[in-house]
Image (cartoon, grey):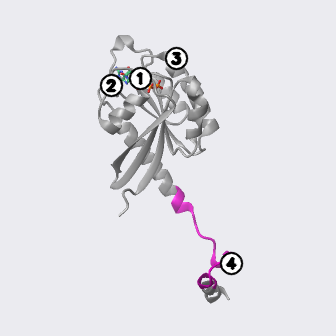
């Protein structure tokens, strides 16, 4: 039996320090580190989850937020089926940069990639907050993407974020595969180099 029904490549992007590595660690290993060790280049982890009775294997790539790694990390947009764009609710510049990150997605990712906006560090006291929940929601609405506030520290909404994007990708894949139709038999082009058995079938059905 196959180990999964679906395999999905996800990407975590956003400014340095917003908590991408911590979200990945929380989701895949259920742990949290208070020390800040910036990601060098790129790293990934895997977790299989159940989505509506189907096994979904998520391969999640954690990119470095720092500008100096940008040429390495953009290569990983190719083939990504979903992107979690993360900002820090206590850092307004990380929120302002969301528009630039959207620009990178438009430039480097597939056109139909699913994107979720995540306002991380929702556990922080109100006095530290620089971006309101309404501002996050309004920006997500503008780009017609889903929005969650979350906390890698307290686990708040972490499962929900990953489950939501996996479900949306699964729906998209199901819709796409149901749209692929075979052409009518008379239009099937037969390769003369193809094995005899295949050509016989062709002659039986059409000739
Ligand atoms: N309070 C709080 N702190 C967090 C949370 N998530 C991450 N942090 C802290 O934020 C700092 C940066 O977290 P990282 O996950 O390393 O950030 P990053 O986005 O991966 O950064 P780069 O690898 O440089 O791109 C660390 O000190 C974490 O402990 C959270 O949900 N709440």
Identify the mark at residue 193; answer none if there is no mark: 4
- Tell whether label 1 touches label 2 (CB within 8 Å): yes
Which SS class for mark 2? Answer: loop
Position of residue 70 in the picture relative to residue 61 (left or right): right
Q: CA distance from mark 3 to mark 2?
A: 23 Å
Where residue 157 sits in the image (x, y, percent)? 34, 33
Figure quadrant of residue 72: top right
Q: Assess whether residue 30 is covered by the magenta stretch.
A: no
Residue behind mark 1: 37
Residue behind mark 3: 93
Residue 149 in view (yes/no): no
Identify the mark at residue 33; answer none if there is no mark: 2
In terms of sequence position, does the residue under pointer 1 or pointer 3 come before the other?
1
Figure quadrant of residue 113: top right
Q: Within 8 Å: ligand 1 and the Cβ of disc 2?
A: yes
Identify the mark at residue 114; answer none if there is no mark: none
Q: CA distance from mark 4 to mark 3?
A: 60 Å
Residue visible at 38% across and 61% down?
2
Disc 3 versus disc 2: nearer the observer = 2
Examine the rendered structure and indicate whether residue 1 appears above or below residue 141.
Answer: below
Where residue 107 sits in the image (x, y, percent)? 64, 36
Q: Which residues are magenta?
A: 176-199
Q: Within 8 Å: ligand 1 and the Cβ of disc 1?
A: yes
Where, quadrant-wise, is the C terminus in this rendering? bottom right
In terms of sequence position, does the residue under pointer 4 or pointer 1 come before the other?
1
- Number of callouts: 4
Which SS class for mark 3? Answer: helix
**Front in this rendered view, residue 144 or 116:** 116
């Amino acid at each position: 039996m196959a180990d999964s029904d679906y395999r999905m490549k996800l990407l975590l992007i956003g400014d340095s320090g917003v908590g991408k590595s911590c979200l990945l660690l929380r989701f895949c290993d259920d742990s949290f580190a208070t020390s800040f060790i910036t990601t060098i280049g790129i790293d990934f982890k895997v977790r299989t989850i159940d989505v509506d009775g189907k096994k979904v294997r998520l391969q999640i790539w954690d990119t470095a937020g720092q500008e100096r790694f940008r040429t390495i990390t953009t290569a990983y947009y190719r083939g990504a089926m979903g992107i979690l764009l993360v900002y820090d609710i206590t850092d307004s510049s990380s929120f302002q940069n969301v528009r630039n990150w959207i620009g990178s997605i438009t430039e480097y990712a597939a056109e139909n990639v699913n994107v979720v906006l995540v306002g991380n560090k929702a556990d922080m006291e109100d006095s530290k907050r620089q971006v309101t929940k309404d501002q996050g929601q309004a920006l997500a609405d503008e780009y017609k993407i889903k929005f969650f506030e979350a906390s890698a520290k307290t686990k708040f909404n972490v499962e929900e974020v990953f489950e939501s994007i996996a479900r949306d990708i699964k729906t998209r894949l199901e819709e796409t595969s149901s749209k692929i139709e075979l052409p009518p038999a008379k239009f099937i082009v037969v390769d003369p180099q193809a094995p005899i058995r295949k050509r016989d079938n062709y002659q039986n059905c059409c000739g």
